[in-house]
Image (cartoon, grey):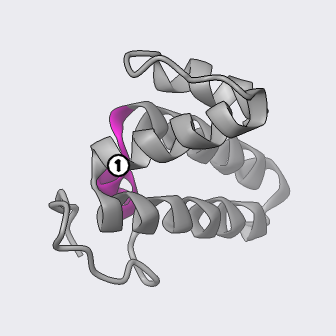
Amino acid sequence: MRATTLEPGRARLLTEASPAEVHAALVPEEAAEFARDWREAMARAAETLDLSEVAEIVESWRLVAQLTAAAGPAAHRAMYRRAAARLAGQEVPHDEPLPRTKARLGL
């Protein structure tokens, strides 16, 4: 399968998505997180000859990619803001960078 960008409203099940397809479906900030997690897990797998952590990383990020593809990038970011606002009991600025919002949530 080749990587393609999924358009909002045209989500499809990503249960069998390749790592490249998962990466393409994520918002840029989370794509960078996925790439970092992937590289770290692959480096450990090269040492241990065990790909189970790599499979776990891809499966975990597939779920995030599915949510992102289903809602679209703006709604995905808004979901994090709503969760952080509820946790903090105050509004989260609309223009707050996603990594900061996720840090509020302990992610």
Residue 19: in sight, yes or no?
no
Q: For the image shown, how many numbered marks are present on the structure?
A: 1
Vertically, is 76 above or below 14? above
Q: Residues within 10 Å of mark 1 (few under 14, many from 20)?
A: some
Type of residue at label 1? Ala
Q: Residue at x 15, y 61 (%)?
A: 7
Q: Residue at x 72, y 25 (%)?
A: 104
Quadrant containing the C terminus is: top right
How far across and how far down the image is residue 8, in percent? 19, 61
Quadrant containing the N terminus is: bottom left
Vertically, is 52 above or below 76? below
Residue 44: in sight, yes or no?
yes
The secondary structure type at the circle numbered 1 is helix
Residue 25: in magenta span: yes
Residue 2: in magenta span: no
Answer with the quarter of the image where residue 82 lies.
Answer: top right
| 71 horizontally vs 107: left or right | left
Q: Which residues are magenta?
A: 19-28
How far across and how far down the image is residue 90, in percent? 66, 23
